[in-house]
Image (tube, rainbow, N blue to C red):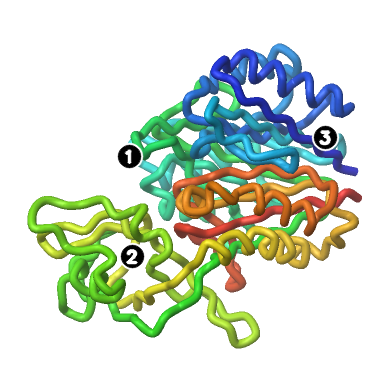
Amino acid sequence: MIRTATAAAETVSTAAAAARCIEQLLAKQLETPDYLMIQADARHDLGVVRAAVRARWPQVRIHAATSCLGSMTESGTHIGPEPGLCVLAIADAEGDYGTACAAIDGTPRATAAALVRAALADADRLGETPAMVWVSSTPGSEEDVIAGLQDVVGSATPIVGGSAADNAIEGKWQVMAGGEAVGNGLVVSVLFPSTRIGAAFHSGYAPTERRGRITRCAGRRVFEIEGRPAADIYSSWTSGAVARPAADSVNVLMATTLWPLGRHMDSIGGADIFLLSHPETLAADGSMTLFTNVAEGEELVLMRGTADSLLERPALVSDAACRMGEIDKAEAAGMILVFCAGCMLTVQERLDEVRRSLHAALPGVPFIAAFTFGEQGPTLACDNRHGNLMISAVTFARD
């Protein structure tokens, strides 16, 4: 049987925030957790959190990452103005959990493969396939990270997570397991829970009729769509909402949150499911950069979102995660939600509506949300992908 509980604090003192979270977990009779999921405002010191946790629970596995502005639990939205710290604790004596963390140092695929093996060893399950891999990487190499994880656990194992974030895209993000926090790195958890889990990976956007194939690109930079400058094509698709600059490049992240680009990923009941890419910059040379890798020949579809669609989607994804794990809502013990920071910032003033909708979908179920700069999750085609402006959910059955 799994038991979960959450804790949260908002204060400038990391030591005080960590102490309050530990006190809350103890007050909820979760005295011997096996695994802690920690999401923190980047202004907090993850090393101070680790020291406080280790002083109380020396053997607990820790998976920590910074999250844009803070985090959210079923008890409230903890996004400031003082920095928030949120914790989801899992007590599962019959399950096994392992974590590992390291700097990437230019070899993301190899680092990911080595870390998932280290996490399996930490769980004392080396050579076995986990029920799920939970991952938090710093932004920039997520596709290679997924490839490295799949080199070890295979493509059918769900890989769910979100890219660590800070508050202003300043590179102040960090990740951590049981050792020192790293600023350009990766933390990996392997989960062998004693009960069922379910995972889902969705977006809250609809396709438009505007689309075209990439005819020249390199990694995350698109030079041409249908043989024309990508920045001009995208500007025309958005009816001039963003424009190609006369010199240098311009950041368009906030202006394009409701107008991402999609690539077809799956179909469910005749409805197409898209993997999203968030346009980051438009350049004077006509190119544009994204927060995902793309390839020549792929079709890009202009997607359209609204604040209401973003607010409604988390509850729908939590429902889907329960269905994927064949978990009745009354049996749910806890949930982890990955909610894109760009989406969160777009609906920030109404974010408590998301919390209330999740509470209505899973009454009384503890959950933690990460506000991320990239999202990872499983597809129906039995592989795992990295996207932007996406939402992932993982639900745990109680028995």
Residue drawn at 39 percent across, 30 percent down? 172
Query: Left or right of 360: which side holds 381?
Result: left
Residue on which the image places disc 1: 106
- Count neighbours of disc 1 (C-alpha within 10 A) and say few if under 14, some if 14 to 19, many if 20 or more: few
Q: Give SS at disc 1.
A: loop
Nearest to viewer (mark 1 / mark 2):
2
Residue drawn at 74 percent across, 38 percent down? 75
Image-quadrant location for residue 76? top right
Percent of width and height locating residue 259 = 39, 67
Percent of width and height locating residue 214 = 26, 74
Q: Which mark is residue 91?
A: 3
Q: Amino acid at mark 3?
A: Ala
**Above or below, 122 relative to 267:** above
Nearest to viewer (mark 3 / mark 1):
3
Q: Which mark is residue 126?
A: none
- Depth order, front residue of 225/313: 313
Quote the CA–CA distance across marks 1 and 2. 20 Å
Percent of width and height locating residue 381 = 58, 73
Mark 3 or 1, nearer chain start: 3
Q: Amino acid at mark 1?
A: Gly
Q: Are marks 3 and 1 in contact (CB under 8 Å)?
A: no
Q: Are marks 1 and 2 in contact (CB under 8 Å)?
A: no
Q: Amino acid at mark 2?
A: Val
Q: Does residue 344 appear in the picture of this structure? A: yes
Q: Give SS at disc 3.
A: strand
Quote the CA–CA distance across marks 3 and 1. 36 Å
Residue on which the image places disc 2: 294
Mark 1 or 2, nearer chain start: 1
Residue drawn at 54 percent across, 80 percent down? 272
Quote the CA–CA distance across marks 2 and 3. 40 Å
